[in-house]
C-alpha cells in the first residue's frame, strides 16, 4: 500500500489517506463476527478487540489464555476448535 501511495505521488513521499477512516466502517458491520483475543498480547490489541466487540452488534469475543499475538500458531488445536464451533 505504501509503495502504491508513493508511486501515485511520483515518489514525493506524500501518503494518500482514504477519505473515510477505517474505524468508521466498524459500526456498519452487520455480520456475525468472532473476535479472538489473547491474554499476553499488547494491551493495545486487546483494547481493539474490546472496541470491536462493543461496536459490532452481533459479535462474540473469546480470550485464549497463555498466548500472545499468534494464537493460531501458539495453540492451533484450541484456535481451530473455536473456529469450528463458531461456524457450526
Image (spheres, grey):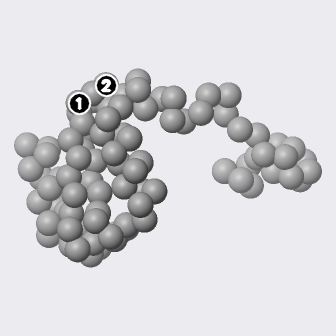
Numbered circle sitting on residue 30:
2
- Mark 2 crowd level (few <14, some 14–19, many ≥20, 10 Å Cα): few
Q: Secondary structure at mark 1?
A: loop
- Percent coordinates x, y for residue 6 in the rendering: 81, 50
Asked if the residues shown at circle 1 and circle 2 are in contact, with their CB atoms under 8 angstroms apart, the answer is yes
* Residue receiving disc 1: 58
- Percent coordinates x, y for residue 52 in the rendering: 36, 40
Is tag 1's residue or tag 2's residue first in the polypeptide sequence?
2
- Percent coordinates x, y for residue 45 in the rendering: 42, 56
Q: Residue at x 54, y 36 (%)?
A: 22
Position of residue 38 in the picture relative to residue 82 (left or right): right
Above or below for 5 versus 21: below
Position of residue 48 in the picture relative to residue 16 (left or right): left
Q: How many marks?
A: 2
Kindly report the distance in space between the C-alpha atoms of the residues bearing marks 1 and 2.
7 Å
Nearer to us: label 1 or label 2: 1
Compare residues 76 and 27 and report the one nearer the observer: 27
- Percent coordinates x, y for residue 19 in the rendering: 68, 28
- Mark 1 crowd level (few <14, some 14–19, many ≥20, 10 Å Cα): few
Determine if residue 7 is in view: no
> Based on the displayed image, in which of its 4 quarters is residue 34 positioned?
top left
Amino acid at each position: 500500500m505504501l509503495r502504491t501511495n508513493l508511486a501515485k505521488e511520483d515518489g514525493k513521499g506524500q501518503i494518500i489517506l482514504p477519505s473515510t477512516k477505517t474505524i468508521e466502517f466498524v459500526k456498519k458491520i452487520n455480520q456475525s463476527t468472532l473476535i479472538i483475543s489473547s491474554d499476553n498480547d499488547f494491551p493495545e490489541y486487546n483494547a481493539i478487540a474490546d472496541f470491536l466487540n462493543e461496536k459490532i452488534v452481533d459479535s462474540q469475543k473469546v480470550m485464549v489464555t497463555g498466548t500472545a499475538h499468534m494464537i493460531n500458531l501458539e495453540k492451533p488445536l484450541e484456535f481451530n476448535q473455536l473456529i469450528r464451533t463458531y461456524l457450526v
